[in-house]
Amino acid sequence: MKVVTGADQPNPFIPITIVVGAIGLLGFSVLTNSRVTVTAPAFAAIVLIAVAYRTILSWRWLLGFICLVILFIPIKRYSLPASLPFSLEPYRVLVAFVGVAWLTSLLIDPRVRFRRTGLDGPLMCFLFVVLIGVVSNHARVATVSCEVYKKLAFFASFIIVIYLIASVLRHARDIELIVSVLTVGGAILAIFAVIERRTNYNVFNHLQTVIPFLRLNPANIPSVPFGQTGRLRVFASAQHSIALGAAFAMLFPLALYRARERARLLWWISALLLGMGALSTGSRTAVVMLVVECIVFIWLRFKEMRRLWPLLIPALLFVHFAAPGALGSVRSSFFPKGGIVQEQTKASVGSGRLATLGPALRTEFHDPLVGEGFGTRVTKDTAIARKNGPILDDEWLGILLETGVLGALSLAWMFLRFIRRCGREAKVDHSPRGWLLASITASVAAFAVGMTFYDAFSFIQVTFLLFILLGLGTATRSCSAAEWVAVPERASAGRATVRPAPASP
């Protein structure tokens, strides 16, 4: 199996045959009163692939489709109709297809080569600690084996995404496409989040009316009231409003990069929408992540950030009128009655981070080196496992309990190495490449800090975004700055607009 990259003289016979055959089958379905609402989208997809397969099956567009599916099809809320022991979700099918295509191409296509990421040491060290922890805690693992295997499979897919992106995105135009997809997709998602905040209507709970082959799982539709306000928290396509706010915060630096480099209203509006989407969730974690990103930008781009400060006031005014109450909700969440420390310490175990910290360390921190086993903590009863620990709302604490000090240090090593390497190059490279590296560094640093305030790895959408950004950062570092001076300003333009590379200060 090999992803098609195109040839100089394509043979149209096979695509035309597929199109004609699909149209004939669709007509037969209509005449026989078959389920046209199900078959029509499938036939349309077949026709689209047959006509434009050279574009659709290129690596960058396959990765773009993965990004769109992760952004817009809620994970665990929808599945595909299939009789399997596990839920067949769209993102699993797409990631598996692209992953197998990549592994196959590594074997048979000389143009596709495995590329090291610079994170190999920390990742291998973490995986080794995970393996030792699972083996040494075999009795505990046996009681929740399905959960452990599922989480191991998830983490393996995350690592595959890093190496896949680093190996197949070899040019600036490919990286720019993925950045554009993430930015525009995130901005559209933010619009729906703001609508949900104002109306309590989540459009992502009704995707099956637009995509008939999706099967909605009503039990996984989230509905959580926001304090005493009487309205629901904003979830959009995420599993939780905190994870949604974190996703918006991670995409915000990419929009700033596009706005700064393209200097177009569309990208400034995208950045504004992403910031507004993060605030509309009412999540303190999202605000903390935005602050971390500002600190990173000040560290890497102090002069440029100083020029952008005047935009802060009109941006806050726009958020105030577009999403009434968003700023007030953020303020009240940081300054609750009695103070935030008292709120966290006086809560019951499993409902407050500080209230849970001490009991969790006393009762669950049995093996300081390799922990109690990766994926063995179950925080709510399921059909296949019983609850064996409280909700921590602190991923670093969860990593410490499950993989011990060695696992936590390995993961911290990964973050620090990535931030140091990308940040160092971003500081000396004042081309668009340097700006993109600075933006990715800000997003990854924000995720690392945000892990302290929620169970980050439990939410697949935002975790996928992290590993996509790690792959994008690795791919960007492997490209030269000269590639970014001739990236097309418009996708519809027939030629690239060459911009002179900025001189180093």
Image (spheres, helix red, strand yellow):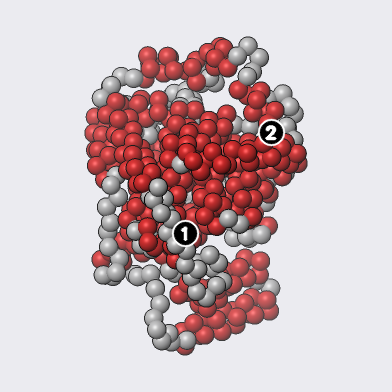
Q: Position of residue 183 (x, y in %)?
A: 55, 52
Q: Is residue 489 above or below residue 472?
A: below
Residue occupying the point 49% across, 28% down: 453
Q: Nearer the viewer, residue 499 or 362?
A: 499
Mark 2 neighbour class, 10 Å CA radius: few under 14, some 14 to 19, many 20 or more: many
Q: Position of residue 111 (x, y in %)?
A: 29, 69
Q: How many marks?
A: 2
Specify which label sits upstream in the sequence, 2 or 1. Answer: 1
Q: Is residue 104 above or below residue 347?
A: below
Q: Nearer the viewer, residue 163 or 135?
A: 163
Q: Secondary structure at mark 2?
A: helix
Residue occupying the point 61% across, 41% down: 275
| Discs 2/1, front | 1
Residue that mark 2 sits on: 326
Instruction: Confirm or deny contact between disc 2 and disc 1 (CB under 8 A).
Output: no
Q: Is residue 388 above or below residue 311?
A: above
Residue occupying the point 61% across, 68% down: 41
- How far apart are the alpha carbons under marks 2 and 1? 32 Å
Residue that mark 1 sits on: 176
Query: In the rendered image, which quarter is residue 95 located in?
Result: bottom left
Task: Indicate left or right for 147 with 79 as reference.
Answer: left
Q: Secondary structure at mark 1?
A: helix
Task: Indicate left or right for 159 with 192 as reference.
Answer: left
Q: Is residue 112 visible?
A: yes
Mark 1 neighbour class, 10 Å CA radius: few under 14, some 14 to 19, many 20 or more: many
Residue occupying the point 59% across, 47% down: 271
Q: Amino acid at mark 2?
A: Ala
Q: Amino acid at mark 1?
A: Glu
